[in-house]
Amino acid sequence: MKNRTSQSGIALLLVLWVLAILTVLVLSFSFMTRTETNATLSFKTGIQKRFLAEAGLERGIMEIFYRIANRNPAVIPEEGHEVWKVNGTPYTDTTGDGSYKVKVIDDSGKLDINALSDVNLDILRNLLKNVEGVQDEDTVNTIVDSILDWKDSSAPGLGTHRLNGAGDDYYRSLPNPYEAKHANFDTLEELVLVKGVTPEILFGDREKKGLIEFLAIKPNTKPGALMINVNSAPQEVLAAIPGMPPELVANIMALRDTKEIMSLSEIPALMQQPQIVSMYLNPSPGNGSNIFTIETLGYTDDEKTAHTIKATIFLESANKFHYLFYKSPAKLLQ
């Protein structure tokens, strides 16, 4: 009897162990299945948001070409067919089970970083002081001279630089050494590599805009050839032009609220400032722009979880363009 009872107890223990192991296996399989299912759904949602953002990008490009074709319409467009503004105004639309938000920004009014030279660098000085609040003269001089040194191709590797700038010797001495580019900037984010340019100055924060919002990179740029379009220039850029009176900036902003400025001669007070016109402004702003930045978000329920894309396009003709910059996902400026 004792042997039979002992054997029954051992069998019961074995059964319990087998059940425990099977329970663990079932729970593990269930957990893995749920994890895989959630991962698949998350991947599907992420892909859906990315395609929604891509749809927003394509819509933005289409609206740019529609704007060009209808810049001077013979009749007022009916409701729903108005041309989009290119000053960063957000436009939202729904497609399928999701939505996208698009902003189109005309970059022709921004400061071309590759067009800066020793002749026109004061506009960048003013922009740093007015927008970024950099009042320390040494810091301003360091940033401006270092930007010019970074893209200066005249003497790479020789260690020469401007008075407050930086050459290869400075960048080689950093904890993670590198060398100055000695060529034009390819992206605006590249500026963070330049001496004196901090992420806070370049990208800003919740309280102020970053320098990057007022800069652009335009194709076929030559140093000293700034071409700022008064129709699309941010107020901060106009105010940073050396010699530009505040009342003239206000007049320009008020005028372009009512119409597109086709010629600088439409602003008599501006024509009395020949140095401003010759050094900084596009003489024929009404000819239109050919460089635009598009920011787009694709989302299904909440914009905070949206997929984001930022792209800059250059218009080669009335129906042809190419990308100058494309980033997906991208950190968009608010």
Image (tube, rainbow, N blue to C red):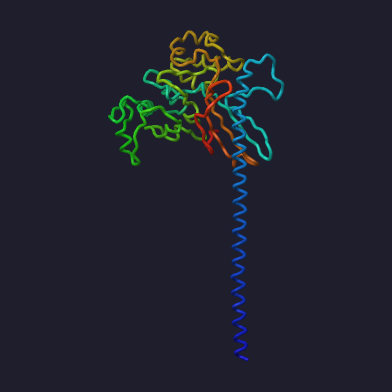
Choose between 305 and 99: the one closer to the eye: 99
Residue 10 locus on image (x, y percent):
59, 82
Q: Position of residue 42 (x, y in %)?
A: 60, 48
Q: Is residue 138 visible?
A: no
Q: Residue at x 59, y 15 (%)?
A: 260
Q: Where residue 137 appears, x then y in whole percent?
A: 37, 26
Percent from the top left, x then y, of residue 71? 62, 17
Look at 45% across and 30% down and name the residue there. 188
Could you say which quadrant of the image residue 77 lies in? top right
Rendered-image quadrant of the N terminus = bottom right
Name the quarter where the C terminus is drawn: top right
Q: Which one is nearer the viewer's eye here, 49 or 271?
A: 49
Seen in the image, is 113 located left or right of residue 176?
A: right
Quadrant hosting residue 173 = top left
Residue lying furthest bottom in this view? 1
Residue at image location 60% in from the left, 62% down from the top: 29
User: Which residue is at the far right?
Assistant: 78
